[in-house]
Amino acid sequence: MTACPECRGAVSVPDDVMAAEIVVCGECSSELEVVAVAPTVLARAPEVEEDWGE
């Protein structure tokens, strides 16, 4: 279990999680990106932006 950076709720993270994976907080439904795995560190996932064909 790891703390959600948004609501401080407990987020269940699988043992085999890899960096850059997305997990969802069960309490606030925030999408979180795994930025480190030992120890597990979560950050709010970046918003998907339009590239407008660039």
Image: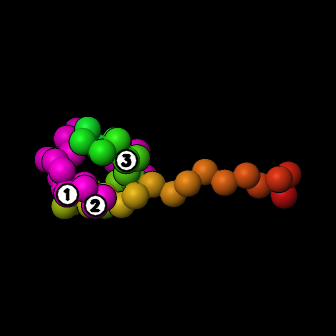
N-terminal label among 2 and 3: 2
Q: Residue at x 30, y 58 (%)?
A: 6
Q: Is residue 27 above or below residue 38?
A: above
Q: Is residue 48 above or below residue 36?
A: above
Which residue is pictured at 84% across the width and 58% down the height? 54
Q: CA distance from mark 3 to mark 1?
A: 11 Å
State the extent of the magenta-drawn residues as a range.
Answer: 1-23
Tell me which secondary structure the magenta stretch mostly adopts: loop
For disc 1, the neighbor class at 10 Å (few under 14, some 14 to 19, many from 20) is few
Dot 2 corresponds to which residue? 5
Circle 1: residue type: Arg
**Magenta residue check for 5:** yes
Q: x, y percentage for residue 1?
A: 14, 47
Contact check, label 1 and label 2, Cβ < 8 Å? yes
Q: Is 37 on the left-hand or right-hand side of 20?
A: left
Residue 8 circle label: 1
Which three-letter amino acid code belongs to the residue tagged 3?
Answer: Ser
State yes or no: residue 16 in magenta: yes
> What secondary structure is found at the residue carrying circle 2?
loop
Q: Residue at x 40, y 58 (%)?
A: 44
* Precedes in sequence: disc 3 or disc 1: 1
Label 3 neighbour load within 10 Å: few <14, some 14-19, many 20+: some
